[in-house]
Amino acid sequence: MTDFRVPGRGRVDHDRPVKFRFDGETIHGLSGDTVASALLAQGRHLMGRSFKYHRPRGPVAAGSEEPNALIGTSRGRGRFEPNTRATVQEIFPGLKATSQNKYPSLKFDIGAVNDRAYMLFSAGFYYKTFMWPRSFWDRVYEPFIRAAAGLGVSPDKVDPDHYASRNLHTDVLVVGAGPAGLAAARTAAEAGLRVTLVDENAEVGGTLLSEPQAMIGGQAAWDWVAAELAALEALGVRVMTRTTAIGYYHQNMVGLCQKLTDHLETPNPDMPRERLWRVRASQVVLAQGALEKPLVFDGNDRPGVMLAGSAQTFLNRYGVRVGDRAVVVTSHDSAWYAAFDLADAGTRIAAIVDTRVEPRPDLMAEAAARRIKVLAGHTVSGTAGRLRVKSVRVNRVSGGTVGFGRQIDCDCLLMSGGWTPSLHLFSHTKGSLKWNETQNTFLPDHVTEACQIAGAGRGLWGIGAALNDGAAMGAAAARALGREAEVGTTDVGNDRPGTGTSHTELPTDRSAARARAFVDFQNDVTAKDLRLAVREGMRSIEHVKRYTTNGMATDQGKMSNINGLNIAADALGKPAPQVGLTTFRPPYTPTTFGAFAGYHRGTHFEATRKTPIDGWAEENGAVFEPVSQWRRAWYFPRKGESMDDAVLRECRTTRESVGMFDASTLGKIEVVGPDAVEFMNRMYTNPWTKLQPGRARYGLLLGDDGFIRDDGVIGRLSDDRFHVTTTTGGAARVLNMMEDYLQTEWPDLKVWLTSTTEQWATIALNGPNARKLLEPFVEGLDISPEAFPHMAVGECTVAGIPARLFRVSFTGELGFEVNIPARHGRALWETLFAAGQAFDICTYGTETMHVLRAEKGYIIVGQDTDGTVTPQDAGIGWAIGKAKPDFVGKRALQRPDLVAEGRKQLVGLLTADGATRLEEGAQIVLDPKQPVPMKMVGHVTSSYRSVAAGRPIALALLEGGHARMGETVHIPMPHGVVAATVTGTVFHDPEGARLKL
Amino acid sequence: MTRFSALSLLRNAVTGHKGWTEQWPDSQPKDEYDVVIVGAGGHGLGAAYYLAKEHGITNVAVIDKGWLGGGNTGRNTTIIRSNYLYDESARLYDHALDLWEGLSQELNYNVMFSRRGVMMLAHNVHDVQSFQRHIHANRLNGVDNRWLTAKEAKAFCPPLNIAPDARYPVMGAALQMRAGTARHDAVAWGYARGAAARGVDIIQNCPVIAIRRGPDGAVQGVDTAKGFIKAKKVAVSAAGHTSVLMDSAGVRMPLESFPLQALVSEPVKPVMPCVVMSNTVHAYISQSDKGELVIGSGTDQYTSYSQRGGLPLIEHTVAAICEVFPIFNRMRMLRKWGGIVDVTPDRSAILGKTPVPGLYVNCGWGTGGFKATPGAAHVLAHTVARDEPHPINAPFTLERFTTGRLIDEAAAAAVAH
Amino acid sequence: MLLIHCPYCDETLPEAEFAYAGEAHVARPLDPSSTSDEEWRDFLFIRSNVKGDHFERWRHAHGCGRFFNAVRDTVSDRFLTTYKAGAPRPDLTALKDAAE
């Protein structure tokens, strides 16, 4: 195999060979190579297959805009990713690269049969067929299409790497470290500003890396870059390479993705693979340069056909000649220089084909000096070669007539259709673009964020122009931040500014309908697809794009958007700007999911809130359930117990002796102030004025729409102090709602609200022996039944720990809730558990809590209510202070539908056979024999096996339920109808005697 | 109109595709129409199609400020399902699903409705209870929906992580097998082509500035960038922009417009066989026929028409996807975009008459309007043609916000549409 | 992510610290019992949802905890001003002139 490496050339290290594998074969490259440059150095252009036609493809570009040379990359178990651009992936020992979208091999791919039938697969063909027979879409056509589509394969293992994220505040963020960006950073930094300079490449320099001939201020380009970099570092500029600015968000926030390990042989395992930066910059300078446009002609996609500027990059940056015998076809001056550089490096330039009739005389002269044949006023009408271009067909164009074609042999064809400013980030800001007639491109117009656009981004060509504009824009950024900034002018020698013309498809003497002139290489969109879309009535660029998929490949239109627009505009007979702007959307280049997820993986996906007693529960075999952000002990199985067994035992022990429950997750809000009682009167449905200090009451909170939002027991500690409890999931919501009303509707009230949820650990003791267990530990409070009755609250010490003690029950048994400072929670829990052994105490979890409360008909907001339930519906109308002039939700309860007959009301249900447990969520009907769709009259909200009732019990919301006591209703299940009797909601101790023990 | 078929495709292939004609003309407004529909998305175009086809009303214009199908129709994640809890919703979405199943044939345009199944993950006991309630209600309503254990869910969707020690473990899932996805653009284009063939004018790039009412209070027409267009009836089907338009007719709406973001990955070979939704972690994902993972995000917290959306939400959404599908961690995001969704207080649509005679509204679909497209369009056409709601959309009134008869799917289920 | 000025803390901070709280200047009727069903609906549900300058509420949830008002252009998401709860609507013309 020929070696296409030019000794000593480029920025690769010729003394450091690097081996890696491509499709199983060992490839010898050099340190500093990309996969693409290493393969090209061996004369291999074929690196991939296209999306639709599976056409053989090689790299058309040298950077992140590459649409063709996509490969799978892997470096060991779990470290595989598809669709990596070979032109970006740096090589390292151990890298395994594989080609994609081919079977069985890259050189012989069965999928390429599509290419033979290309006439069938015109734009939007799938909208027109695959409709008959109807059932075939799911079963035949779609599976076939899906299997054919896609490029690489998904990773199939969990990613062992980790990812990081950081925030950064900077005065000036400069995006792009080419001549404009370097100069902007230098100027802003010299004005005394904190500057951050980022570039997606492995090193700074941008276009200068491909143009070593330039002399900047008397210095050779690469020496200048090195000196500038040193100067920037000395000025404290943060320079980040391999860092892509992916998106430009509100108020000058720019997202960056920094790649840290993908180029390393043996990365430090502690190092993240990538890091997402959220940069907030006072000023942003966009110096992203320009992207070269391909020319559109038949066969412009064969391996070996590439952008002239990219060929120049491969030569000057990587020391690789992309072929031995090149033809250059161009409509822009820049490609001539690529030809000269390659010629000087030993590639034979068979011809420079310029579509323009009169190329620049100085270029003609240089070509002549190198004995390069120039075909001015010519077009390219075709290429030949299956896995590599082997010849090109050129024709003279005169007076609009295309002459005979003649063939020129070559092994590479370098093309240039001119350059397009890279305005992707600018586009993210919704900044407007304006069509520039002379340059035939969009340039930035109205700027919406604090940003400057420098250099090629605003249509300035040549290193000198870019560099001096960069300095000017750096100064503009500095001045916008109130700094003085000096702007000098730098002389650039051997500069290569140029101009060009723009084309749609190149003229041809052949049938345009047969031409395979690609616009979007990866998605196989041809010029005639675009014209077909227009013929079919697609008039906006958005329609054309969506109909043909032009610009929707992984390069996101970097190669294809402007050519596509020009062709569509031509087909419509309209100027390009009237056909519409193509919108660029973030990210600038495809960005790893892991970088976005950052630290939020696994257990760190979201915080897990744990109570102080959680550790004990874990050590004692609790099974947990997630409840909002908390994890709560669900039940405490003993050896060999099923969940049902454990819950039944916990229920029995609690009802017969005493059970202990960790209620610390209950929300707690301290409501304090001279107007606390008035505030409570307005917020909650209940009346609070007459509640004495030392007493507690069940509180019900509605929204102003009249529906139940939350509930909880509320103790009055003193005239001006309430201890409010909320549901576990509702704590933050309730506090926010209280603050909202307090601050914005009733700012006159003197009340202060404090969340105390995490200050207190709450231990609930329930059961006939609860007092016997607790009493010995209590000091400073008489908790006898007479002195401390049901719904009493008081302050005391428990086992020497200061406590707020509530006598309250969510089980129907004698109950106490001990609130102690959180740090003592576990100690007291263990103390009580030890002392409880004398009573055969059990600990119980949320499931038993649910059963015990359901036996008493106590509702759980969010389970027995669902956001459409009023207090009356829930059977707790008694909690409404009817005499109060107002409370949140009072007005809404008078709305027509909330007082209508037939609302769903909470009832109890007992299955007729006394043995079947209904399913929660099961629907209730009156007539089980009716056909589907059935008239449903309600559903089961809670359902449990009940020890206390000796049978399964259920709560349900039932239409007109309160008036249906004793009636039989039906619950149709998949395997038969269950009959149930409507009852009250209290299944245990209806008199409440046990509460009063 | 050229009829689309394998044969016509073949015939055109041979002749270099010269025979295809435009799928709809770019009409200029006439002075007067029987019906003007504001908003050329799937809903508006579909309503025009059904007005012409089923009600014989063809003097219809569909007017859009931009290009047809350029709003939420072309910006959504294309999830189609009907397993809603309440009878009202189930009827509406199941009606839509019935129409989806025959839509390609109806329109002679392959909308690629793909019944690959939509699976909704339960991550806690509350989710389980809620989904079971849905499944039972759906069964008695004749709506397909069934319960899967975590293992069954994994078997149905192999990339799913069902490790019990996950931060939000999968406790099971509700699966609607009949549900799936469709090609969003094709829906707008198919309806546009069908409507245009029946005489409907589709007027693009013509912003409607105001709805004009006569001295009797009834609708007279619309003021547009291209002048006044007289109309006996006006139907507003303009998603996020509804409030502004209705306000011009003196009708204030219970709507707020929020940014909604979505994103796709680079394309890969088939790996996700179905649609998966997880409301608890806020992740919605499917794979397009092209191979891209299509991922839905939640709405940003503030109202906006900017279509920009913030980075934090994207970070969270991608984290959620990687939590449920850890093998996708090394996949790459290709592009993300934003839409504007109009949200009602009960998260259900408003579809029907308004206090203004001759003015109809179809809005408030929030994040879930795409799936309703054929159904909503169909009953909107009925409502406009008959000046009375179809029984299916009768409950989706504006009045419900006065009476309190809300259709609160969100409160009932904590499930995103 | 937006940057928001809290008028109580007098600092401009990232959106992550704040919670959006809906349209501003929608006052709860002082005597709800005397309102009609329509008036109550308006209070609960009807929102201007303007495309342009929007008066809205934010809460500095992870800061001082205060609710305050803001004017934001919903087309560009740019804040014109923020001001304390209870303060009257600012004069937008004057604000815009000042910004020019």
Image (tube, coloured by chain):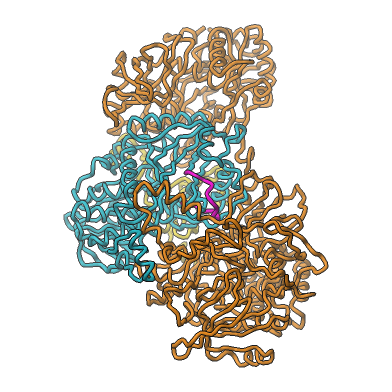
Chain colours: A orange, B cyan, C yellow
Residue at the right extreme of this rendering: A15
Query: Which residue is farthest left?
Result: B216
Instruction: In the rendered view, tell whether residue B131 sits above or below residue A345.
Output: above
Q: Is residue B266 magenta?
A: yes
Residue found 63% across the figure and 64% down from its top = A47
Q: Is residue B361 above or below residue A541?
A: above
> In x, y percent, where is residue A272?
71, 50
Report x, y in % for residue A723: 54, 26
Residue A920 found in image quarter: top left
Question: Which percent across, then down, holds residue C48?
Answer: 37, 51
Q: Which residues are magenta?
A: B260-274
Viewer-side residue, B199 vs A46: A46
Query: In x, y percent, where is residue C96?
Result: 46, 64
For the stretch drawn in magenta, the main secondary structure is loop
Residue at the spot x=64%, y=91% of the render?
A: A362
Residue at image location 42% in from the left, 39% down from the top: B177
Is B259 one of the magenta-colored residues? no
Query: Can I make out residue B357 in this image?
Result: no
